[in-house]
Image (cartoon, helix red, strand yellow):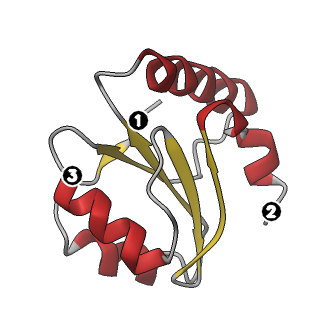
């Protein structure tokens, strides 16, 4: 699974534009949290099994980029969580989940 790294504020405009034609997932991950690591591993396994390679996933390392995480929360109107997934469609967050509620199959059912 190849995730695109979300590491600049300008990428949010890119994500908004791309989400007009394809859903985008943002996966917010804390590299210091075992729950976050477990949720990421589970997400990656399901992604591979579903062969969802046409579904772009942006990976946000919360430890390196807390400022961008805060911007994501305010830009999309969601409370910060870790780990957390956001489904972006037409520039808006249409679904978000955190911790063990992260379920790629559920996300894919939203579009």
Q: Nearer the viewer, residue 13 or 71?
A: 71
**Circle 1 sits in a helix, a strand or a loop, which is it?**
loop
Provide the secondary structure element on which disc 2 rests: loop
Disc 3 versus disc 1: distance between alpha carbons? 22 Å
Q: Quadrant of residue 109?
A: bottom right
Q: Are marks 1 and 2 in contact (CB under 8 Å)?
A: no
For the residues bearing labels 2 and 3, Cβ distance under 8 angstroms: no
Residue 2: percent from the left, percent from the top? 40, 35
Provide the residue designation for mark 1: 2
Query: Callout 3: few (<14), some (14-19), or many (20+) C-alpha neighbours within 10 Å?
Result: some
Q: Is residue 13 above or below residue 95?
A: below
Q: Is residue 78 left or right of residue 3?
A: right
For disc 2, the neighbor class at 10 Å (few under 14, some 14 to 19, many from 20) is few
Sequence order check, earlier mark of 2 and 3? 3
Q: Nearer the viewer, residue 59 or 68?
A: 68
Query: Is label 3 in contact with label 1 (beta carbons under 8 Å)?
Result: no
* Horizontal and vertical percent position of residue 58: 40, 51
Residue underneath mark 2 = 110
Residue 44 versus residue 84: which sits nearer the camera?
84
> Element type at marker 3?
helix
The dot on residue 66 is 3
Name the residue: 67% across, 30% down.
100
Q: Which label's residue is closer to the chain start, 3 or 1?
A: 1
Between 3 and 103, the one lying in front of the other is 103
Q: What x and y, as percent, mark residue 69?
A: 30, 57
> Which mark sits nearer the N-terminus, 1 or 2?
1
Residue closest to the far front: 79
Closer to viewer: mark 1 or mark 2: 2
Rendering coords of residue 74 (x, y %): 38, 76
Q: What residue lies at 19% left-to-right and 70% top-to-bottom?
A: 9
State the CA–CA distance, disc 1 to disc 2.
22 Å
């Amino acid at each position: 699974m190849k995730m695109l790294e979300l590491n600049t504020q300008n990428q949010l405009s890119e994500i908004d534009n791309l989400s007009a034609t394809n859903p985008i997932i943002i996966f917010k991950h804390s590299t210091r949290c075992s729950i976050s690591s477990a949720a990421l591993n589970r997400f990656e396994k399901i992604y591979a099994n579903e062969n969802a390679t046409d579904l772009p996933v942006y990976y946000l390392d919360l430890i390196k980029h807390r400022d961008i995480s805060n911007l994501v929360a305010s830009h999309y109107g969601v409370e910060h969580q870790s780990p957390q997934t956001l489904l972006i469609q037409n520039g808006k967050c249409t679904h978000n989940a955190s911790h063990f509620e992260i379920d790629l199959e559920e996300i894919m059912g939203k579009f």
